[in-house]
Image (spheres, grey):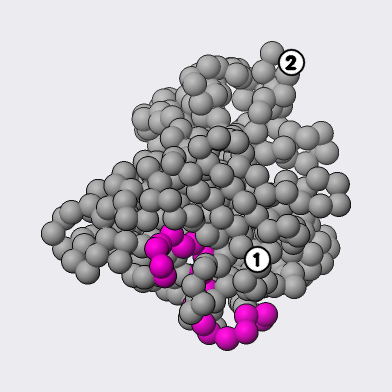
């Protein structure tokens, strides 16, 4: 069974400990919140699975007449990285294809980006034969080909072949980190091939002479997913989801936005491999998970855990503690952890300000409000304002005890990241603090 030791960024109820930070520049940050933030500009094809009654359908979300998507008759529809995904059993019949003039134009000599999620089923992979994820080539040859392969059997390696001929190629080979879900983004930018894993650049390669690889030789050849038309290749065993092809090279920010952090603790979502939060002694952290297909949970240590066998327990440690959760399904085991620092209120001084980085205004009585967590250590509030991503003020107060309930003009705001600015005076000294808070619903 694939085993993943994961400590990864998420939306968290992390509380910043800020001491006399002076005149910090107020930065408007972009959002890593989910599908609504993902770009569709220059999208050639977007293949997803839709459950219709008792059956599943493979669709191109854009329904472009210049892109033809064909799938197997009996799609094995299972839990995906978001919504439903496609299970491939490695047989020749388990294959999806898409083709058309727009697809050919994208691969020919333009910059392009291919993004997809895949979750290998290592236990049911018959051997260590390389498995085809994507294939576009003529007569099973190496010249003029685009092929993406996964190597099972514990090596967890991925190869990307981008070849025009024996003299012009930009292929790469990389080992993947230990995760259940892998979000892969392959970018062809000029003469380079760049591989991203879960939003982070993993490897890049370039042609020797700086010439862009031209795949015009495979015009009218279909792109196959999960298998190929070549007998020597092995079929993929596992789940795939959210397949996107763009006819341009996406930026790093756009690639990060495509990663949805499946199977993660949702407290403190971010891209720096840290997950921690701070509470006062006697406080608690209601845990949330991102989208997950797992149905078995085991939290450790169990001290201060309301129920160590559920996905969303309430953690109430009396001392600073690192909690770990093991999540498992029939395919994979994933591990995540969160560090909770416990602070005694009596040790907090004037100017030591605590602000959560996420809250859940859902009316359950837990983390429904956002504001200064230790108001009596703040001093005099000169201005406390919260902005949406377009710079509109959604909340403003001069009362240190007043908190935001996640609404604007009486209506709940959409989930996402909001910016705040807190200006205060403590011991005759003015300070300005700025940051972001995530609304989770």
Q: Residues within 10 Å of mark 1 (few under 14, many from 20)?
A: many
Q: Which mark is residue 410?
A: 2
Nearest to the eye among marks 2 and 1: give it: 1
Q: Is residue 415 above or below residue 151?
A: above
Residue 348 visible within the image: no
Instruction: Pick out the residue farthest to the top.
Output: 409
Q: Check residue 129 for magenta coloring.
A: yes
Residue at 82% x, 67% y: name it: 309
Residue 180 x/y as whole percent? 60, 67
Question: At 51% from the left edge and 82% from the top edge, which residue is drawn?
Answer: 129
Mark 1, secondary structure of its residue: loop
The numbered disc on residue 175 is none
Q: Secondary structure at mark 2?
A: loop
Query: Going by the image, does 424 lie left or right of 248?
Result: right
Residue range corresponding to the magenta coloring: 123-140
Q: Is residue 180 left or right of residue 79?
A: left
Report whether residue 100 is seen: yes
Q: How many marks?
A: 2
């Amino acid at each position: 069974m694939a085993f993943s030791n994961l400590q990864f960024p998420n939306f968290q109820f992390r509380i910043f400990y800020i001491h006399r930070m002076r005149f910090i520049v107020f930065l408007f940050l972009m959002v890593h919140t989910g599908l609504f933030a993902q770009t569709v500009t220059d999208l050639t094809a977007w293949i997803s699975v839709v459950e219709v009654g008792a059956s599943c359908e493979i669709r191109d979300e854009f329904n472009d007449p210049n892109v033809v998507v064909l799938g197997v008759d009996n799609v094995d529809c299972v839990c995906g990285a978001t919504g439903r995904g496609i299970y491939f059993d490695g047989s020749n019949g388990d294959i999806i294809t898409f083709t058309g003039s727009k697809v050919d134009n994208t691969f020919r000599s333009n910059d392009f980006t291919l993004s997809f999620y895949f979750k290998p089923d290592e236990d049911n992979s018959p051997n260590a034969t390389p498995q085809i994820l994507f294939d576009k080539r003529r007569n099973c040859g190496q010249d003029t080909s685009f092929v993406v392969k996964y190597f099972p059997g514990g090596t967890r390696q991925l190869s990307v072949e981008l070849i025009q001929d024996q003299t012009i190629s930009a292929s790469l080979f990389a080992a993947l980190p230990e995760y259940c879900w892998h979000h892969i983004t392959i970018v062809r930018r000029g003469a380079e091939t760049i591989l991203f894993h879960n939003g982070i650049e993993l490897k890049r390669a370039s042609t020797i002479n700086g010439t862009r690889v031209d795949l015009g030789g495979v015009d009218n050849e279909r792109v196959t997913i999960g298998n190929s038309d070549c007998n020597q290749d092995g079929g993929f065993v596992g789940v795939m989801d959210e397949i996107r092809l763009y006819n341009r090279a996406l930026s790093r920010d756009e690639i990060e936005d495509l990663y949805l952090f499946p199977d993660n603790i949702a407290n403190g979502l971010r891209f720096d491999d840290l997950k921690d939060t701070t509470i006062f002694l006697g406080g608690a952290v209601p845990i949330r998970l991102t989208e997950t297909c797992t149905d078995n949970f085991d939290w450790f240590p169990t001290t201060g855990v309301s129920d160590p066998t559920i996905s969303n327990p309430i953690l109430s440690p009396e001392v600073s503690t690192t909690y770990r959760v093991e999540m498992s399904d029939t395919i994979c085991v994933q591990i995540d952890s969160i560090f909770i620092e416990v602070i005694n209120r009596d040790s907090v001084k004037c100017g030591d300000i605590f602000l959560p980085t996420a809250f859940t205004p859902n009316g359950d009585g837990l983390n429904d409000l956002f504001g200064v967590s230790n108001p009596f250590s703040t001093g005099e509030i000169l201005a406390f304002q919260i902005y949406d991503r377009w710079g509109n003020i959604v909340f403003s107060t001069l009362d240190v005890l007043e908190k935001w309930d996640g609404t604007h003009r009486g209506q709940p705001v959409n989930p996402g990241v909001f910016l705040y600015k807190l200006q205060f005076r403590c011991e005759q000294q003015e300070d300005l603090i700025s940051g972001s808070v995530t609304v989770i619903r």
